[in-house]
Image (spheres, rainbow, N blue to C red):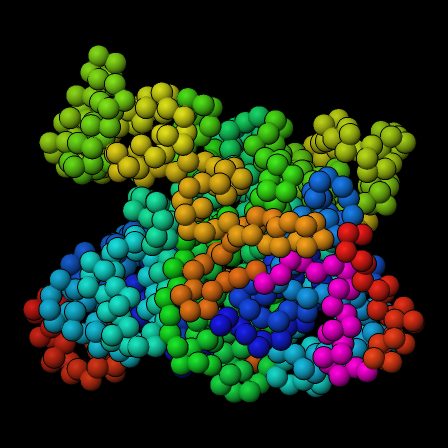
Amino acid sequence: MSALAGTRVIELSHERTAWAGKLLADMGADVVLVEPPGGDATRAWPPFAGDVPGPERSLHWWHHQTSKRGIALDLDDARGRDVLRRLVSGADVLLEGEPPGRLGAQGLDPADLAALRPELVMASITPFGREGPRRDEPATDLTLLAAGGPVWSCGYDDHALPPVRGLGGQAAHIGGHYAVLAVLTALLHRAASGEGQHVDVSLYAAANVTTEMASYHWLVQRTTVQRQTGRHAMEFQTLPTQIRCADGRHVCTGVPPRRRAEFARLVAWLESLGIDELAFPELVFLRRGAERDVDFAQIGVDDEVTAIFAAAREAMNLAASRLPAHEFFLGAQRNAGIPVGVIHSPEEAFEDEHFRARGFQVEVAHPELGRSVRYPGAPWRFEKTPWRISRRAPRLGEHTEEVLSAAGIAREEIAALRAAGVLGRAAPEAGA
Amino acid sequence: MAKALARFRICDFTGQLAGAGATKWLAAFGAEVIRIEDPATQGRWDILRSMPPFVDERRGVDFGGGFNNHNVEKLGLTLNLRTERGRELLAEIVKRSDVVAENFASGVMERLGFGYARLRELRPDVVYVSNCVFGHVGPYAAFKTWGPIVQAVCGLTFTSGLPDREPAGWGYSYMDHTGGMAMAIAILLALLHRERTGEGQWVDLACTEAGLALHGPAILDWTVNGRPTRRPGSPHANRSESPPMAPHGIYPARGDDEWVAIACRSDAEFAALAGVVAAPWAREARFAALAGRLAAQDELDALVAGWTREREKQAAAGALRAVGIPAAPVARPQERIDGDPTTAAWGLWPTVHHAKMGDVRVDGLPVHLSKTDWELHRGGPCVGEHTELVLGRLLGLSPDDVAKLRAEGVV
């Protein structure tokens, strides 16, 4: 059984709703994706399978639309809007990311739909919210993350270099997470009260409250954090935590040993790497650390503590210079018990033994290609209601007849709608 | 306003941001969230309790500004689980809780004597959500971790950088925010399932997997096309390949460390940009179409930077936005918090009242629900602030009973 089995979601296809829709769909909601007859714009986003462009080949599309069914429907046509109203009248949730004002002009505002279906939970995901002076400003992932705070905190020690916007379309991910939280909260309210409601999600607001210290240091003490390479932005310069290893790849460190037993394990690990007093005279300080607990508040006060701390950092750099990043990571963790993270690229993380062992890689059948494809798997492990990709992303209009029939629309009417162009062309044949 | 989650009680062992952020959401919508903390260490397992920022430089376990930010509207109870009586009291609280939430390292709840099997004995339909870096099973389950390791291992650090340089990473614990959201989503999903079926469950959340799921197209590019993200010239995080846009970047503006982000989505927008820039290069035919601009991105970026460098970031962004091009200054915290009235108008920085810190502004929520919106009024709990209240209201203990427990070191 799935957590959202029987929950009917209508998603007006948009780059801003795709992630929220996928989260619900992979947890078992019946998500019907409504695309314009020409297809959603993100179908044209690279990369493409085999690097061959085509509306059914975008890997962005494949990833974000799993477990959904898709229909093509022209909402610029009154007949298309009528079909949407009929679908909504049987739905639990409507997700939309339309520019503010567009649905209102079509008679599909939250109030219109609430009148039609009081139990409906409708969520709007827009750059600045549905109201307010900025609601019509043009925006993208880059500009939202720049205006909303994340970019200010990311980049390099060298401030002649620009700050950096992390990849992956994170503005929509942040907003999508908040949208799902709000939808589920509204569904729990509905379960007790019977009433639906509207949820207004602002991507800009979402970025603003997702910057950790940058915001709350200003709110509490009116100080401004500054970006630093590979570590937290802070008001002052901190010591580097990112180390380059023998293979040119990097690891993330940052929490030095402080207990006797931890120093003893560090010394043993270094010795196993052939790092002795001859190669590393400061080993003597680590041996001292293995004899006494180190209070890091004493760094810069107590000479021996300062030397022990410095030696631990030096030892990590030396070990890193002798080992490839992944070996360093495993050695530091397994032998020395030191918190270290290897800096994986996404594909390296995907192939890592830990995630493979946890079953993170899942196979999704692509019948048209005659094979299955490995996808990223569950963000969480539910004991009773497992996450699951139930189907690959829908082809344009793939489920139009099926969904409309189930909504009680007669075969003749469907044919008439199609003839009028409201449903686009018939779904493409496999392989097209 | 009605509270959507008022009927739920959360027995909350979470801390830091990755855990506390999850239960903050629940508390904001009216759930009764009871933080269980150790009286012996004054709740210092959550290091944010005594970490800066501080109001007026006042320090101590009840003054951590980050702790307050993440724990608004929660109740604070201390219980010494090393004592028999402390464990008995916790058992009684678990029996009365819908959810047990924690983000300890894997194995800690077992050692405390409250692993999932025990929780279920106490409360058969309990929703138990654990949240740690690598999850409770798998080869790395026992690894030691802290926040930035999540981002390093799951690919987010790597994909935030400029070409041919070391990773820049995320200058904050983005995955603590995201892990907290994933945890809260898991709790709500499990509650919905329980309401329909009466069945509780355990959700094992590994923050690294929640992070890996954020790189879907890059991973499919690998599994379908065999193209790795680690390749020469990649990542180039301020550019956009999906969808392809040029110019697209973060450009210097007039002043010290001032920058402006520009994303030109189409040929029409580039023509509009050319009109604003009004320089001969912008009218060159080779830049008129996307393919030409993509082929000459380095040169184009330098030309755009030449224009932005002479202008205030607000003015540059405003001129481009006026013709429909997405553009925004890279905002300092104060510029978006106090300098942009729309964030305050959203209610994004509510003032809460903290028992010792006084009135403090905190992060609000980026959503509004038309019938059951969130509310944040009370600051994060001081250590043991609500011990008497919770033990009295929930377990019927008298002030004398609690005084005795206090003398025995149980609370």
Of the pair B214 and B228, the residue shown nearer to us = B228
Q: Residue B163: where, in percent of width, then height? A: 60, 29
The image shows a total of numbered marks equal to 0
A78 falls in the magenta region: no
A391 falls in the magenta region: yes
Residue A307 seen in the current view: no
Q: Is the magenta stretch mostly helix, strand or loop?
A: loop
Q: Relative to A127, does residue A166 appear above or below in the rendering?
A: above
Q: In which quarter of the image is residue B118?
A: bottom left
Question: What quarter of the picture does the C terminus of chain B occupy?
Answer: bottom left
Q: Residue A34: where, in percent of width, then height? A: 74, 67
Q: Residue A220: where, in percent of width, then height? A: 41, 54
Of the pair B181 and B368, the residue shown nearer to us = B181
Q: Tell me where the magenta segment starts and ends, as one range.
A: A390-410
Residue B164 seen in the current view: yes
Residue drawn at x 41%, y 29% is A325
Taking the view exactly as shown, the residue that stands out farthest to the top is A278
Q: Relative to B68, does residue B289 appear above or below in the rendering?
A: above
Of the pair B410 and A222, the residue shown nearer to us = B410
Q: Relative to B291, does residue B141 appear above or below in the rendering?
A: below
Residue drawn at x 41%, y 21% is A246
Residue drawn at x 48%, y 56% is A379
Q: Residue B39: where, in percent of width, then height? A: 18, 62
